Image: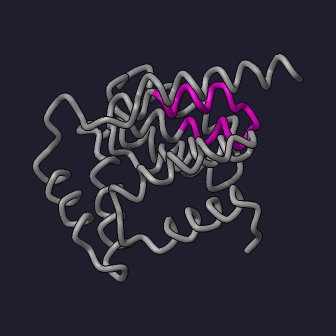
Amino acid sequence: MGIERHYINSIATTLLITVGFSTPVWAQSERLDLLFEQLLEAESDEVERIEGQIITEWSKSGSAAMDLLLRRGEDAIEAGEFGQAVEHLTALVDHAPDFAEGYHGRATAYYNLGLYGPAIDDLRQTLVIEPRHFGAMIGVAVILEELDRVEEALEVWQKVAELSPADAEVEQVIERLNASLSGQTL
């Protein structure tokens, strides 16, 4: 167990160093850029709607067959059939290696199977393809916190807050982690 935890810790550290949550090198679609601008200026009651629109944009692969594989993977996750979800999403990643949602979905399935190493690898790849992917960042933050790497988890949550400053849930998590680090309980 110690070697496995060390391996996961090494992957998480590499993820944070490698990806760095920088701005994208390549141009994103105009629609996503506009939505992210709106998210920066959103009031708290608008955040969920705008984030939902961003997720909808991310879910569009440009191929009906790839969209079907994504939908099947997501349906399997919702049904708690994580092994089957990995199969569908692996097929998606194999056929559309530049489609971030395939990796993000498979990371979710791996996480639910308790396979943190593969989950972190897929979250890393999601962020390589889409550096603003707040869902992948949240996945990284959750895993880091579960690994008792609270300071690093807090850093990732703060990156999420930079993308969506009016998100009350993100703000609450940041407050909780800050309190935890200072020895307080909420």
| Figure quadrant of residue 24 | top left
Judging from the image, the colouring scheme is: one colour
Which residue is found at the position 56% from the left and 41% from the top?
Answer: 140
Q: Return the x and y of residue 136 as percentages of the image width and height.
A: 48, 43
Which residue is found at the position 58% from the left and 64% from the top?
Answer: 173
Which is more toward the observer, 90 or 123? Answer: 123
Marker count (numbered) = 0
Which residue is found at the position 51% from the left and 27% from the top?
Answer: 15
Which is more toward the observer, 84 or 26? Answer: 26
| Figure quadrant of residue 7 | top right
Q: Quadrant of the N terminus?
A: top right
Decide if residue 45 is on the left or right side of residue 174. left
Work out whether 128 lies above or below 180.
above
Q: Which residues are magenta?
A: 106-124
Q: Quadrant of the C terminus?
A: bottom right
Q: Farthest residue toward the bottom? A: 45
Main SS of residues in magenta: helix
Q: Return the x and y of residue 148 as percentages of the image width and height.
A: 75, 43
Q: Is residue 167 magenta?
A: no
Work out whether 152 lies above or below 91.
below
Q: Return the x and y of residue 40 as percentages of the image width and height.
A: 25, 64
| Figure quadrant of residue 61 | top left
Q: Farthest residue toward the front? A: 182
Q: Is residue 120 magenta?
A: yes
Q: Farthest residue toward the right? A: 1
Q: Return the x and y of residue 39 as percentages of the image width and height.
A: 26, 65
Which is more toward the observer, 56 or 20? Answer: 20
Which residue is found at the position 52% from the left and 50% from the top?
Answer: 138
